[in-house]
Image (tube, rainbow, N blue to C red):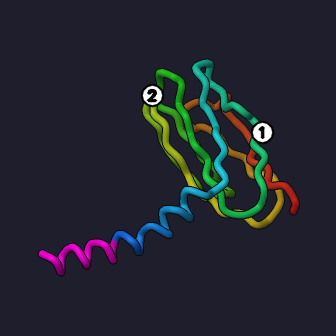
Amino acid sequence: MRVWLILLSIFVSGLLPLAAAHAELPTHTLTFTADGRFDPPRLEVAPGRFKIVLVNQSTQAVEFESLPLRAEKVLAPGVTSFVVLSLSRPGEYPFFDDFHPQAKGVLVVRPK
């Protein structure tokens, strides 16, 4: 029993730095509104690794998709999820919702 507790504590202590590093990511929120658009339609971020929290406030399934970012996430009605991206090159990266053609936006990576 004692060996098991020691192994468990070593395992958990090894995961704590990973969890702390993940928790410290800059986080931005992108909401799909009830009226069928992304808010904000222009999301500005600093270069590096970051998290985008995706919130679906609508009563329909929605999709966050970007070909240049190679990212795609489908959310059921009322669901919140996230994507983690890492971008070092400044520029504009369009995103859209395949289910709602009017819903478009752009992720802007600012220069350092």
- Nearest the eye: 27 or 93: 27
Q: How far apart are marks 1 and 2 (CA)?
A: 22 Å
Residue 93 at x, y percent in the picture: 75, 52
Which image quadrant is residue 11 in?
bottom left
Residue that extends furthest to the top in the rendered view of this protein: 35
102 left or right of 61 in image: right
The image quadrant where one finds the C terminus is bottom right
Point out the residue furthest to the left here: 1
Label disc, if present, on residue 77 of the rendered structure: 2
**Percent x, y of residue 68:** 69, 57
Q: Residues within 10 Å of mark 2 (few under 14, many from 20)?
A: some
Q: In this view, does 16 lie above or below 28?
A: below
- SS at badge 2: loop
User: 9 or 19, which is in the foreground?
Assistant: 9
Amino acid marked by disc 2: Pro
Q: Residue at x 75, y 42 (%)?
A: 43
Q: Quadrant of residue 54?
A: top right
Magenta segment's dominant SS is: helix
- Tell me where the magenta segment starts and ends, as one range: 1-11
Residue located 64% across and 48% down the image: 27
Question: Residue visible at 58% across and 43% down?
Answer: 53
Q: Mark 1 points at which residue?
A: 42
Q: Which of marks 1 and 2 is nearer the N terminus?
A: 1
